[in-house]
């Protein structure tokens, strides 16, 4: 980075199948002059979401696709280094959808992608990208509002050592679930789930037979399944649900990079036979109540009742390779990239 230029990672080509580093290009250009109403933010951390893969496809979705040549969309936290908006002062820490770039010149008033939010004092700023940000809020509304977790529920979470799954599983515990089991890839993640996050058991889908382990852990079936991955794990879970069980479809990362979409759940009829309720949701529908969720989540985190993990990579040049970590299962907890101290 030179003083007056901005590094930006822009979408170069639309990926087919697995996203590649070469689908993005690093461009440098002068930082434009600040206009009235605008704020100049120096990004410190970039956040990575599996959904980014979907934003690269030119198909209708809950957000428009990122255009070729556009800065890659991402949530960030950073510091205000100049302001021509009365609502923001130099030195404040803020978060927003500012993208894969070192500097962002943004309107201080909220736009279609939301606005800048002030990071409250006394919290590590990057928590606003994870446990108190998109993934924490998704876990909260998915588990409480959509899943309706209640006292005595036996709960299963897939993608359980990830940013969303790890918080969702612990919320189930806090809300009185009698048993919470997580599915994750590898012994290190499974150990974290039982030793740090306090889950009752963890299933390593990379080395264990998920279907038979579910039968052992849930002899009377799963009351509530919070699914982040879809694919074969969803099929295994459908065959192990309790009668009238609930399935929350949060995401389906196992299929995000497939060139040909795999056939739908093979055990679809279990939804009928077991009279399951299956609900999909998108966080945006609940965002108006973010304050309420952040209040409860921050209380749990402060009291040590919810543990959260962050995987912090470093160096702006590593943005594309950091995104790939999500699909390679390399992250434990929230995937972040620190681009400046
Ligand atoms: P994350 O769970 O922190 O990271 C992704 C994890 O997915 C990886 O660490 C990996 O863990 C697992 N994974 C990767 N490929 C897989 C595969 N083929 N099969 C099974 N697991 C695989 O990511 P996150 O940001 O918290 O997102 C989790 C899910 O929530 C995603 O599906 C995302 O799209 C969804 N989400 C939905 C909303 C919404 O509004 N509905 C909002 C945010 C996120 P392992 O090592 O355990 O495989």
Image (cartoon, helix red, strand yellow):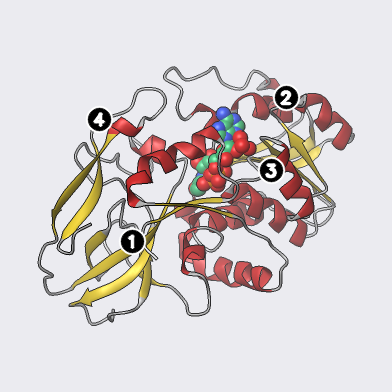
User: Looking at the figure, which quarter contains the N terminus?
Assistant: bottom left
Mark 1–mark 4 contact, CB under 8 Å?
no
Which callout, 3 or 1, points to the residue nearer the camera? Answer: 3
Mark 4–mark 2 contact, CB under 8 Å?
no
Q: Residue at x 46, y 45 (%)?
A: 49
Alpha carbon separation for disc pair 4 and 2: 40 Å
Q: Percent position (x, y) of residue 151?
A: 81, 57
Q: Residues within 10 Å of mark 2 (few under 14, many from 20)?
A: some
Which callout, 2 or 3, points to the residue nearer the camera? Answer: 3
Residue 114's tag is 1
Q: Residue at x 28, y 81 (%)?
A: 89
Helix or strand or loop: what does disc 2 sit on? helix
| In the displayed structure image, the side of residue 19 where residue 197 appears, left or right | right
Label 2 or label 3, whichever comes before in sequence order: 3
Alpha carbon separation for disc pair 2 and 3: 29 Å
Label 4 or label 2, whichever comes before in sequence order: 4
Q: How many marks?
A: 4
- The yes-or-no answer for disc 4 within 8 Å of ligand 1 is no
Residue 270's tag is 2
Helix or strand or loop: what does disc 4 sit on? loop
Taking the image in four quarters, ligand 1 sits in the one at: top right
- The yes-or-no answer for disc 3 within 8 Å of ligand 1 is yes
Which callout, 2 or 1, points to the residue nearer the camera? Answer: 1
Q: Percent position (x, y) of residue 135?
A: 53, 53
Please give the residue where the numbered disc 4 appears in the rendered image. 13
Q: Is residue 225 visible?
A: no
Alpha carbon separation for disc pair 2 and 1: 40 Å
Label 3 or label 1, whichever comes before in sequence order: 1
Please give the residue where the numbered disc 3 appears in the rendered image. 189
Alpha carbon separation for disc pair 1 and 4: 26 Å
């Amino acid at each position: 980075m030179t003083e007056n230029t901005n590094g930006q990672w822009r979408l170069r080509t639309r990926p087919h199948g697995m996203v590649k580093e070469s689908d993005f290009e690093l461009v440098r250009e002068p930082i434009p002059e600040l206009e009235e109403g605008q704020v100049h933010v120096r990004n410190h951390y970039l956040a990575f979401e599996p959904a980014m893969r979907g934003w690269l496809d030119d198909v209708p979705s809950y957000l428009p696709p990122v255009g070729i040549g556009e800065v890659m969309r991402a949530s960030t936290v950073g510091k205000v280094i100049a302001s021509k908006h009365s609502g923001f002062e130099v030195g404040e820490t803020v978060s927003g959808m500012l993208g894969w770039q070192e500097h962002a010149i943004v309107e201080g008033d909220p736009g279609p992608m939301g606005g800048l939010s002030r990071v409250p004092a006394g919290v590590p700023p990057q928590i606003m990208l994870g446990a108190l940000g998109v993934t924490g809020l998704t876990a909260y509304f998915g588990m409480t509002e959509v899943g309706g977790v209640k006292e005595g529920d036996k709960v299963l979470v897939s993608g359980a050592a990830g940013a969303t799954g790890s918080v969702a599983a612990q919320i189930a515990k806090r809300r009185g679930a009698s048993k919470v089991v997580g599915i994750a890839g590898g012994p290190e993640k499974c150990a974290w789930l039982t030793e740090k996050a306090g889950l009752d058991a963890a299933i390593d889908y990379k080395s264990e037979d998920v279907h038979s382990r579910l039968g052992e852990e849930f002899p009377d079936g799963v009351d509530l399944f919070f699914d982040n991955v879809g694919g074969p794990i969803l099929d295994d879970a459908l065959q192990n649900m309790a009668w009238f069980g609930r399935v929350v479809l949060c995401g389906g990362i196992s299929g995000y990079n497939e060139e040909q979409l795999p056939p739908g759940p093979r055990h679809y009829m279990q939804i009928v036979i077991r009279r399951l309720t299956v609900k999909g949701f998108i966080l945006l529908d609940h965002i108006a109540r973010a304050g309420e969720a952040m209040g409860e989540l921050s209380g749990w985190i402060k009291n040590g009742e919810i543990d959260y993990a962050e995987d912090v990579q470093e160096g702006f040049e590593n943005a594309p390779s950091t995104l790939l970590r999500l699909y390679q299962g390399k992250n434990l907890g929230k995937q972040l990239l620190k681009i400046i101290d």
